[in-house]
Image (spheres, rainbow, N blue to C red):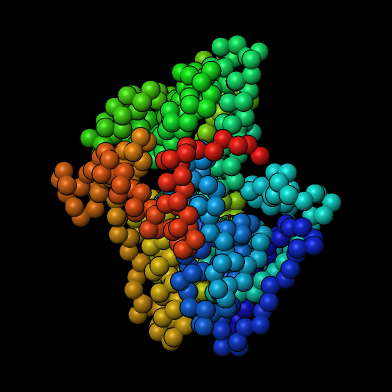
């Protein structure tokens, strides 16, 4: 068994820094999983720990349940409903930090763009924090570090816009909204200033941007106008997209339904709009007009994880720079050969045969296939006898607010009108599906409880 290494930075409070144990049974292989997202977290749960000594490396000690980030950003659900602790998985070591290099660790130039708690001013102080380069040995490595949000190099986006990718983003968006409401309600704020502060703008008309706009509109209609009567009718929500419409991956009839629904709700849709610059309280459209914003949520697509550019000898997808993998999810090297013990799954992986969307659905199916494969291999089955990865498209869903959603399975095996559903019944399907997907029992209980609390008492607007 030949061990190789990955280098990773651990940024943490000195007092809490701990090395992880390597007291594994000799027969166990060291399995290192980079990332605690849909792919990494699922593998850590599904892998047989009697067969592997498992270590998860991630800057986050939790898994973010991304479909609920929009709900958490406005308080329909509390933050903890959208996270699961990695340390909650039995017999898995966890090392908090960023994987920085693989195979040939080099001193770090600073972690990737993800912010450390210290950078965000969340906990601890800088003097207490340490950054150390560690090396971890592995026999088998799984790269599941996902992607970052893309800003397309547009000036000001990274500094002034809010991305929605992680539970910390939900928290900063929620604080920003509540801050704007409190500023707007001050007695010396003019009506025009109120309108500007309450101009909530979303860039990106895909499912993530649309679900956020819908959740925000529900919050405004159901709670803001009740709790801040002075602000009645002063909030505006606008969704911009460079495409000719929203939800372009959905069937036309469903897209029309969503557009009509938003029009009725007063959410403005601005297709064919190109944002060219962003400032602290304005955004520029098509290099000409500047409009004010009190909150700007940016959800326009994905950029490759900086770790990808540090992987030498690995074949990458030309378009999105993700790692090319074979049918067994093994990383393909630049000589077009699969690497025997290095796998990639989730948003940072792209199978050689055909492009797959960057979704939790794909990431979890890859995770399931790879876990089964590794478990079989751990019991002595040859890799080539294990099931090759194939993606089964289960369709798409999006919630559009006011107890309405849309389900589109027209790319699935179902055809015709039966493949599409919109309205309250689709919303029940949306909620039931995601509730059952919640991984831990704690959240299976918490989620319906919080939905019920929001229904009866409204969303909490406490800011801390
Ligand atoms: C708001 C939102 C809603 C969504 N809703 C849906 C939906 O309803 N249905 C659906 O199918 N898809 C949805 N998606 C897409 C889905 O969440 C992603 O496709 C999925 O998260 C990809 O999983 P992943 O494991 O590849 O990456 P991620 O889930 O992004 O996880 C990556 C992990 O790697 C860690 N990491 C990053 N860099 C490093 C490093 N250098 N070293 C170690 N760890 C690192 C990160 O901290 C994270 O833990 C949504 C996405 C968002 C943002």
**Farthest residue, direction front:** 456
Q: Is residue 35 left or right of residue 262?
A: right
One can see residue 303 in this view: no
The quarter holding residue 366 reads: bottom left
> Which residue is more in the foreground, 367 or 104?
367
Tell which of 216 and 342 is nearer to you.
216
Report the label total.
Answer: 0
Q: Residue at x 42, y 46 (%)?
A: 452
| Residue at horizontal 66 percent and vertical 82 percent from the top | 23
Task: State the image coordinates of residue 129 (x, y, percent, origin top left).
Answer: 79, 55
Left/right placement of residue 35 relative to residue 431 reads right
Residue 181 visible to the viewer:
yes
The picture places residue 100, in percent across and down from the top left corner, at 66, 59
* Residue 58 screen position, x and y as percent: 61, 60
Compared across the picture, whether 87 is left or right of 249 comes to right
Q: Is residue 279 above or below residue 191?
A: below
Kindly give the residue lying farthest to the left in the view shown.
Answer: 416
> Dividing the image into 4 quarters, which one contains the C terminus?
top right
The quadrant of the rendering that contains the N terminus is: bottom right
Farthest right residue? 127
In this view, 368 is above or below 182:
below
| Image coordinates for residue 450, horizontal then vertical, percent | 47, 48
Q: Residue at x 48, y 74 (%)?
A: 47
Vertical relation: 10 (above or below) 238: below
Answer above or below: position of 365 versus 320.
below
Give residue 205's quadrant in the image. Answer: top left
Which residue is rendered at x = 41% and y = 75% of the image?
373
């Amino acid at each position: 068994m030949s061990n190789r290494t990955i280098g990773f930075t651990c940024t943490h409070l000195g007092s809490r820094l701990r090395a992880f144990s390597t007291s594994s049974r000799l027969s166990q292989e060291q399995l290192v999983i980079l990332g605690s997202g849909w792919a990494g977290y699922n593998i850590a749960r599904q892998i047989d720990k009697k067969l592997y000594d498992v270590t998860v490396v991630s800057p986050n000690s939790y898994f973010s349940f991304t479909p609920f980030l929009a709900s958490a950003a406005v308080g329909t659900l509390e933050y903890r409903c959208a996270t699961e602790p990695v340390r909650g998985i039995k017999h898995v070591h966890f090392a908090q930090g960023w994987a920085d290099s693989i195979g040939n660790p080099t001193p770090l130039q600073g972690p990737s763009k993800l912010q450390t708690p210290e950078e965000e001013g969340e906990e601890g102080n800088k003097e207490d924090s340490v950054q150390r380069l560690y090396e971890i040995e592995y026999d088998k490595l799984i790269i599941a570090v996902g992607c970052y949000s893309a800003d397309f190099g547009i000036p000001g986006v990274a500094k002034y816009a809010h991305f929605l990718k992680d539970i910390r983003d939900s928290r900063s968006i929620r604080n920003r909204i509540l801050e704007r409401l409190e500023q707007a309600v001050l007695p010396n704020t003019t009506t025009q200033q109120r309108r500007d502060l309450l101009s909530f703008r979303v860039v990106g008309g895909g499912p993530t941007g649309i679900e956020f706009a819908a959740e925000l509109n529900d919050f405004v209609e159901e709670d803001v106008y009740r709790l801040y009567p002075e602000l009645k009718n002063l909030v505006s929500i606008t969704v911009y997209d460079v495409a000719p419409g929203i939800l372009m991956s959905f069937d036309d009839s469903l897209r029309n339904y969503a557009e009509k629904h938003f029009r009725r709700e007063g959410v403005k849709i601005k297709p064919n709009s190109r944002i060219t610059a962003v400032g602290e309280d304005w955004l520029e459209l098509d290099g000409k007009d500047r409009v004010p914003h009190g909150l700007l949520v940016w959800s326009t697509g994905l950029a490759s994880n900086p770790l990808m550019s540090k992987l030498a000898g690995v074949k990458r997808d030309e378009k999105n720079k993700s790692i090319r993998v074979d049918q067994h999810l093994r990383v393909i090297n630049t000589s077009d050969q699969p690497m025997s013990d290095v796998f990639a799954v989730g948003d940072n992986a792209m199978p050689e045969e055909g492009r797959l969307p960057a979704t939790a659905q794909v990431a979890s199916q890859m995770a399931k296939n790879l876990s089964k494969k590794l478990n079989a291999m751990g019991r002595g089955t040859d890799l080539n006898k294990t099931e090759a990865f194939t993606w089964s498209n289960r369709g798409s869903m999006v919630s559009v607010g006011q107890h309405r959603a849309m389900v589109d399975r027209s790319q699935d095996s179902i055809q015709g009108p039966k493949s599409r559903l919109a309205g309250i019944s689709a919303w029940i399907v949306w909620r039931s599906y995601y509730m059952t997907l919640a991984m831990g029992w704690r959240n299976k209980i918490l989620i319906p409880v919080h939905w019920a609390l929001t229904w009866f008492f409204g969303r909490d607007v406490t800011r801390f």
